[in-house]
C-alpha cells in the first residue's frame, strides 16, 4: 500500500476536523473521531500534527490566509 504524502494527509485531517465540527459540534473533535473520519489510526495523526490544537491553528491559518488573499484581490 502506498503511503500518502504529509501534505495530502494534513489536508485530509483538517477536512475531517471541519466535517466533525459542522456535523457534530466542536466538543466531538477528538483524535479518535478524527482518525475514524479519515480512516487512519489515532497515532497516525501525530505523524502530521503535534497536537489537536496544532490542527485547529493550522485551519485558522488557512482561513486567515484565504481572507487576506480575497481582500488583496478586491482592493
Image (cartoon, grey):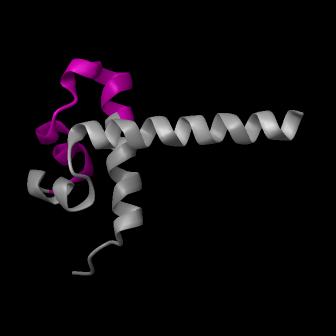
On the image, the x and y values in percent for residue 6 come to 34, 67
Q: Going 20% across and 62% down the picture, which residue do you hit? A: 47
Q: Considering only vertical position in the picture, is 39 above or below 75?
A: below
Toward the right, the furthest residue is: 75
Q: Is residue 65 magenta?
A: no
Based on the displayed image, in which of its 4 quarters is residue 72 positioned? Answer: top right
Q: Is residue 31 magenta?
A: yes
On the image, the x and y values in percent for residue 12 come to 36, 53
Q: Going 66% across and 34% down the picture, which residue do you hit? A: 67
Q: Is residue 51 left or right of residue 25?
A: left
Q: Is residue 14 left or right of residue 47?
A: right
Give the residues drawn in magenta, as a range: 18-40
Q: Considering only vertical position in the picture, is 13 above or below 5?
A: above
Q: Considering only vertical position in the picture, is 60 above or below 49?
A: above
- State the residue in front, 57 or 4: 57
Q: Is residue 45 left or right of residue 68?
A: left
**Dominant SS type (magenta):** helix
On the image, the x and y values in percent for residue 14 come to 37, 45
Amino acid at each position: 500500500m502506498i503511503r500518502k504524502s504529509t501534505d495530502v494527509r494534513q489536508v485530509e485531517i483538517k477536512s475531517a476536523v471541519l466535517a466533525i465540527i459542522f456535523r457534530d459540534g466542536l466538543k466531538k473533535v477528538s483524535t479518535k473521531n478524527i482518525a475514524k473520519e479519515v480512516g487512519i489510526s489515532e497515532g497516525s495523526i501525530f505523524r502530521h500534527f503535534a497536537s489537536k490544537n496544532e490542527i485547529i491553528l493550522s485551519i485558522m491559518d488557512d482561513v486567515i490566509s484565504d481572507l487576506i488573499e480575497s481582500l488583496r484581490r478586491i482592493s
